[in-house]
Image (cartoon, rainbow, N blue to C red):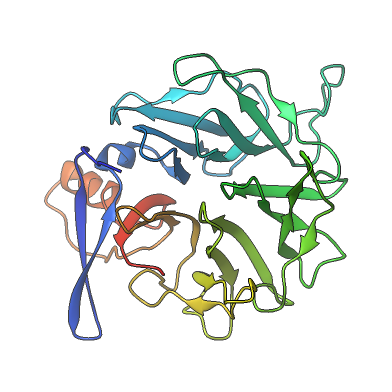
Amino acid sequence: MKVLWSIFFLSITVLGFSQDVELVNKELNKFQNVRDFCAALPQDEIYFTFQSPDQNISQILCVKKGKWASPEIVSFCDEYSYLEPFLSVDGNRLYFASNRPKNDADKAKSDFDIWYVQRSNLKSDWSKPINLGSPINTADDEFYPTLAANNNLYFTKDAKSGLGKDDIYLAEWKDNTYQAPTLLSANINSEGYEFNAFVSPDESLLIYTKYDAKDGFGSGDLYYSLKDNSGQWTAAKNLGNVINTRYMEYCPFYDAASKTLYFTSKRNNLKPQRFKDFNDLKEYISSGQNGLSRLYKYKIDLK
């Protein structure tokens, strides 16, 4: 994917060598909480979530052709919560999580389900939201849809039937319908929290967050797993202490063509100091790694 947008660099020194983690775009600094980067590759169209500090307001935004200063709320958003968008490979279907009512006759918000909108081509409008239905959606909360090119669906589910509170499930696409979701193995899930899985189009790579893991750096860390020769997911590995910090890292998206990992982080490197004036204070707090939910990118070859 060609990235023509301005980039703000943050330098981090780890284990004696210099690495660069970059804010996706400094224009996003004006927002307090952004997350969930996704794109239809190589198309120049980006979707992400913008939230209020308490997350009670959650809306999906779109940036086209790198116009970061002019994001647009997607047409189907309303007073309910919308988050965690994921585009199909052709860019004509957008999946997301929402607590909107399951049918138009209701007004009260629902549990979180996986929904989608579709369009006939990249220039046409999105349809009204369509609930993905059974067997994907249940009375439990379903989050963070991500699809391989063969339409196999990976998602997060908060269910008593899982290994922990949040787990990652797979629903296979067969005979033009989704099969009953299955819990991924203990190489991926645990008795703790696993969520926000990204799967590569060829279904060979899985990246996701494990929360408070024994080999983690604190809070939520990004892990990855590759499929072995028998088609099974290998034991997940921590992506390391350049990407992961003692703060929350989550919502991964990987562009294999450019070897770029996009992710959300609440990393914070602010330090108390003396400021010249209010503008100096405001600039320092509002820029860079300040503990707010922000979108970052990092060059890494995952294979």
- Quarter where residue 76 is shown: top right
- Quarter where residue 56 is shown: top right
Residue at position x 51%, y 51% from top?
Answer: 201
How many numbered discs?
Answer: 0
Whether residue 163 sits left or right of residue 88 in the image: it is right
Furthest-top residue in this view: 124
Please say whether residue 57 is visible from this viewpoint: no
In the image, residue 284 above or below residue 184: above
Residue at position x 72%, y 57% from top?
Answer: 170
79 or 115, nearer to the observer: 115
Please say whether residue 201 is visible from this viewpoint: yes
Report x, y in % for residue 205: 51, 64
In the image, residue 91 above or below residue 154: above
In the image, residue 158 above or below residue 105: below
Q: Which image quarter holds the N terminus?
A: top left
46 or 98, nearer to the observer: 46
Whether residue 101 sits left or right of residue 19 in the image: it is right
Report x, y in % for residue 62: 44, 29
Report x, y in % for residue 282: 24, 45
Residue at position x 66%, y 24% from top?
Answer: 79
30 or 229, nearer to the observer: 229
Q: Which image quarter holds the C terminus?
A: bottom left
34 or 242, nearer to the observer: 242
Report x, y in % for residue 36: 49, 46
